[in-house]
Image (cartoon, helix red, strand yellow):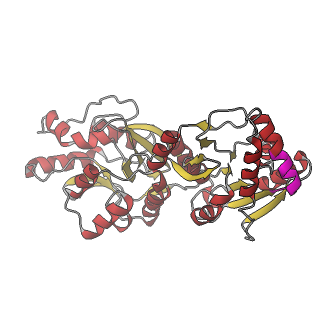
Amino acid sequence: MTRYALYYAPDQNSAWWATGCRWLGRDPVTGQDLQQPLIEGMPPLVLQKLTGDARRYGFHATLKAPFRLAEGFREEHLLHTLAAFCAAQTRITVQGPAVLPMGDFLALRAAEESRDIHALAMRCVSYFDFLRAPPSDAELNRRRSNQLSQRQEQLLQRWGYPYTEEEYRFHMTLTDKLQDVDADVGYRLRKAAENFFRIDAPLLINGIALFREDAPGAPFSLLRRFDFGLHALEHHARQLPTPGRLFFIVGPSGSGKDELLNWVRQHLAEDKAMVFPQRTITRPASHAEEHEAVSSEQFWQLASAGHFAMTWQSYDLCYGIRRSFEAELKAGRDVVISGSREFVPRLIQAYPEAQVIWIEADHALIRQRIEARLNLHEKGNNGNNGAALLKRVQRNEQFSRPELPEIIKLDNTGSLETAGRRLLDILTAS
């Protein structure tokens, strides 16, 4: 299964990148094998063997360790959030990079630990964690094979990786473990690395590289690199993207909610900063709404697998909103969801910053609209319209609008354009 990793990798046209790739013997962009440097007194196969694992991962420093995407998210969601995140970051200079031992292996490390680098790594770990699937038992056991401390075990449980927070150390791995290597070989290897990485140029962290592993054990490839914003601090004091706003539109049957949303969607067709997630419904496809039609069995399979952020039931139908809208919010896009009044208490608990817009209308008009809709869609049901009408009217009476600051009332008794303009103003207000 595909895994992704957020790495620092030097610019592809820099001496650091060319040197690092040559040392490890592979270019993660092209996948091409490269000739490694010759080390006096050491056969080429020895260097190849002692860098085998590091070569698979590519020349990099870890910011967020490899992870699988959680159910409900796709690669495009990771790309969108990463682009927004990097636009809010500022460049960091690695002071005095040098080849130094790190445990049992060699790595390119900074002369001293940097608060800025550490903060960047933790922003990556925490900001993108909503996209991370929980590690499997096999993955956990592989991490635990390194005899983790109690604190590292806690970090493994929290972040899926034991070397975060105070355990994090910025480094660019140059060899595999060397504990069984002859002392003379180890000495020659270190001296060769020191000479090879003697580069008269600053090592700048000015972007994040997204690496991908297409199958277990496959070499990691550099999928895409995102540069940091040139003036990020002027707009992002916390160096995090400004999140989008979540709007949850509800209203009784007959309030005209769907017509209002269609009107607004048409007027915002060119606005890429606002997203209207498609609903998943256990109802056949129709012209009334462009929803994802699934069977009841398919719906609950998706729900149990974690694809939905929201689910509710109404009129013997199941409704779901896929989790992918959370990535849109993270990337700074506003999200508008057609929801249910019944779900409002759970919404406020799960998304405290959400804005609920409660569509209302005159009771007589609501009844008239319901009757017209039933006559249109249920004509010829041998008198069942009356029962359906009664059911909808009774359900409408079950829910009264709570007097809460996060709930805005919008009256849709008049013309569609009047209410549509009002809703448009609410959604686009800065």
Which residue is depicted at the point 65% across and 48% down?
A: 315
Position of 175 with respect to 95 (left or right) is left
- Can you say whether 28 is above or below 64 in the image? above
- Classify residue 403 as left or right of residue 11: right
Q: Which residues, given as a range, are shown in magenta?
A: 360-370
Foreground pick, 163 / 115: 163
* Image spot of residue 339 (x, y percent): 67, 52
**Outermost residue, front side:** 382
Q: Quadrant of residue 49?
A: top left
As drawn, is 195 to the left or to the right of 395? left
Magenta-colored stretch includes residue 363: yes
| Residue at (71% x, 56% y) in the render | 395
Pick the residue in front: 378 or 258.
Answer: 378
Residue at position x 37%, y 53% from top?
A: 134
Expressed as whole percent of the image width and height from the top left, the position of residue 354 reads: 66, 61
Q: Quadrant of residue 400?
A: bottom right
Q: Is residue 112 magenta?
A: no
Q: Which quadrant would the N terminus be assigned to in this image?
A: top left
Q: Is residue 185 visible?
A: yes
| Whether residue 429 is situated above or below residue 185 in the rendered picture | below
